[in-house]
Amino acid sequence: MVQGKVFLVGAGPGDPKLITVRGMELLQQADVIVYDRLASPKLLDYAREGAECIYCGKQADHHSLPQPEINRVIVEKALKGKMVVRLKGGDPFVFGRGGEEAEACIAAGLSYEVVPGITSGIAAPAYAGIPVTHRDYSSSVTFVTGHKAFGKESDIDWERLSSAVDTLVFYMGVGNLPDIVKHLRQHGRAKETPVALVRWGTCENQETLTGTLETIVEQVQQARFQAPAIIIVGEVVRLREQLAWYEQRLPHVVIA
Ligand code: SAH
């Protein structure tokens, strides 16, 4: 029997056009597509007729399909000889548990490939006019999970993050924003440090909120700003004032 194969494909940050050409080609060929909440459903339009599309989306406090179950579905389908595309929001290996899915493939003796995607931690700031590095303002950037920012048990090295890294980009951090801000302040980041939140980055309903470590928690509460959002902390946020383009873009001009 022919053995199937698994492709861990990055869907890009939101706008369906931001998938890679390779990712799109694989979607067109797949027998089975296992997709996430954060992968644009419009991408399923590429699926060929008869392809099986399985939703395993997760919400912040509600797992529709637990991770072991997702791994099991992927492996089972591939062992039946199917070409499986595991379509994941952003990049599969950036806070996407793609590593665990790859491990499950290896454990089952399946071959797999990874197709990187544009991660929301770069794309959402870019669409808000915030370059995560800049020659004059930031020579380093770190991606951090906001999920583990909670309370004293946080296993994040706040000391080093606060002092040694210029730009901090938090994923899954909206719910824990007060903790994130507290940790950064306690470890010496100035209260004037600019902060931005970008919600549904690169999507039509993208929203951005900017403030400082001193003001942002209250602003987020007042605006009832919700996940999914990327939080950017650092001087580069100031550039948005000049570089914001998404809100001001003109209709696309086609040059023949
Ligand atoms: N693998 C994904 C990240 C998955 S973790 C990637 O590379 O982008 C899920 C978190 O990603 C969300 O809680 C949010 O912080 C962030 N995220 C994903 N898509 C987003 C978007 N379009 N706009 C803002 N944040 C997004």
Image (cartoon, rainbow, N blue to C red):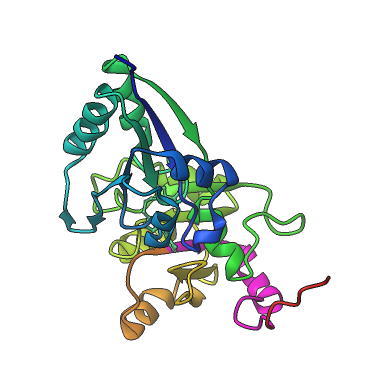
Residue 241 horizontal side relative to residue 167, left or right: right
Asked whether residue 231 is drawn in magenta, I would say: yes
Query: Compared with residue 81, is residue 152 higher up or lower down, i.e. above or below?
Result: below
> From which residue to which does the magenta span run?
230-250
On the image, which quarter does residue 219 sit in?
A: bottom left
| Residue at image location 60% in from the left, 81% down from the top | 247
Residue lying farthest to the right in this orientation: 256
Between 73 and 53, the one nearer to me in the picture: 53
Figure quadrant of the C terminus: bottom right
Residue lying farthest to the front in this orientation: 49
**Residue 202 appears in view:** yes
Asked whether residue 95 is drawn in magenta, I would say: no
Between 110 and 45, the one nearer to me in the picture: 45
- The image shows residue 61 at horizontal and vertical percentages of 18, 58
Query: Compared with residue 233, is residue 80 higher up or lower down, i.e. above or below?
Result: above
Numbered marks: total: 0
**Residue 93 appears in view:** no
- The image shows residue 252 at horizontal and vertical percentages of 70, 77
| Residue at image location 23% in from the left, 44% down from the top | 153
Query: Compared with residue 138, is residue 107 higher up or lower down, i.e. above or below?
Result: above
| Residue at image location 25% in from the left, 27% down from the top | 75
- The image shows residue 60 at horizontal and vertical percentages of 23, 58
Report ligand 1 position as a quadrant. bottom left
Figure quadrant of the N terminus: top left
Residue 23 horizontal side relative to residue 44, left or right: right
On the image, which quarter does residue 235 sit in?
A: bottom right
